[in-house]
Amino acid sequence: MKLGSVPGLVTIPEGADPIAARIEKVAKHGLQVLGVFLRPEMRDAANLERAAELAHKRGVELRLGTGGSFYLEGDDARAEAERVAENVNFAARHLGIRFSSVAASPMSMHRWAPGLPLDERKRRASATLARLADAVAGAGVTLGLENHCDWRGHEVVEIVKGANRPNLKMQIDTGNAFSVFEEPVDCARAMAPWVVSCHLKDLHVTPFNFEKDGCRGTRAVSVPLGEGHVDNVEICRILKQQAPDPDSISLIIEPFYMEPDADVDVFFTRSVAWAKKHLAEFLSA
């Protein structure tokens, strides 16, 4: 497995190139993967190709993250699949990416949201993801559907099985399971046979502790790796045993969220140090 980071945890000087500067920083910290989100102002083909060359020199794999509205039907669903595919294919052509995570949006559409029955939502998501997978297959891209604070692990499996495409796999987010009241280790057991990428996350969960912090209900707080209740060691062990190609899995460190006054650099360095120490048996040299 390869250790990496989402871009939001990699601080860079103001005005620096958002991809190249992060490539240099993660390489300096001994990381092998950098997550990339392509905003409209970043779609300069020549600059992206320079970044791709730099990433190759530094031994850093670039992995895209994207999303879309996967619960549409008819022409709207086809248009959405085409829109997302264009972004993925652009990144494949100019950044050399061969993997993109995909997350269903909006995040307000989750397993408890009113509206369409759950089985119909899954059916629509499967159909749109099948179109999307077909549209990026020619570029050699594998997609990984994430449990994005919307579905439990076994439900992600149902959606991917429904799409039935060889280049549609899964990206497990180890902390997001708590947001749908699922034990992260159980989520890993359900998803592992399809997992090709991982967002590595930790959360501290308070079921009910009004006297201490005013929390009248369950609360999940984002913390650096090793400081919460996600058993990321056991999850990596499950992935090592059950994933289709565990050595190629990217463990991409990601926060659940960041408080406005959070020290991002401290969060990043503590998480990297914990992962290098406690996940060493799973990490490639």
Image: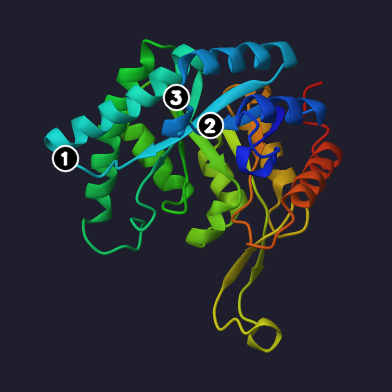
Q: Is residue 82 above or below residue 279?
A: above
Of the residues under marks 1 and 3, which one precedes in the sequence? 3
Q: CA distance from mark 1 to mark 2?
A: 29 Å
Residue occupying image coordinates x 13% and y 33%: 75
Q: Which residue is mark 1?
A: 73
Q: Nearer the viewer, residue 82 or 244?
A: 82
Report the amino acid beneath label 2: Pro
Q: Nearer the viewer, residue 80 or 183?
A: 80
Q: Which residue is mark 3?
A: 43
Q: Position of residue 266 (x, y in %)?
A: 79, 51
Question: Callout 2: helix, strand or loop?
Answer: helix
Q: Which residue is mark 2?
A: 193
Of the residues under marks 1 and 2, which one precedes in the sequence? 1
Left or right for 241, reference 173: right
Question: Callout 3: helix, strand or loop?
Answer: loop
Query: Which-is-in-front pick, marks 1 and 3?
Result: 3
Q: Position of residue 209 (x, y in %)?
A: 65, 82
Q: Position of residue 38 (x, y in %)?
A: 47, 31
Query: Which-is-in-front pick, marks 3 and 2?
Result: 3
Q: CA distance from mark 3 to mark 2?
A: 34 Å
Tell me which corner region of the image, top left, top right, bottom left or bottom right, holds residue 130: top left
Tell me which corner region of the image, top left, top right, bottom left or bottom right, holds residue 1: top right
Figure quadrant of the C terminus: top right
Report the amino acid beneath label 1: Glu
**Crowd rating for badge 3 (residues with CA inside 10 Å; few <14, some 14–19, many 20+):** some
**Crowd rating for badge 1 (residues with CA inside 10 Å; few <14, some 14–19, many 20+):** some
Report the amino acid beneath label 3: Arg
Left or right for 94, reference 51: left
Residue occupying image coordinates x 62% and y 50%: 185
Q: CA distance from mark 1 to mark 3?
A: 29 Å
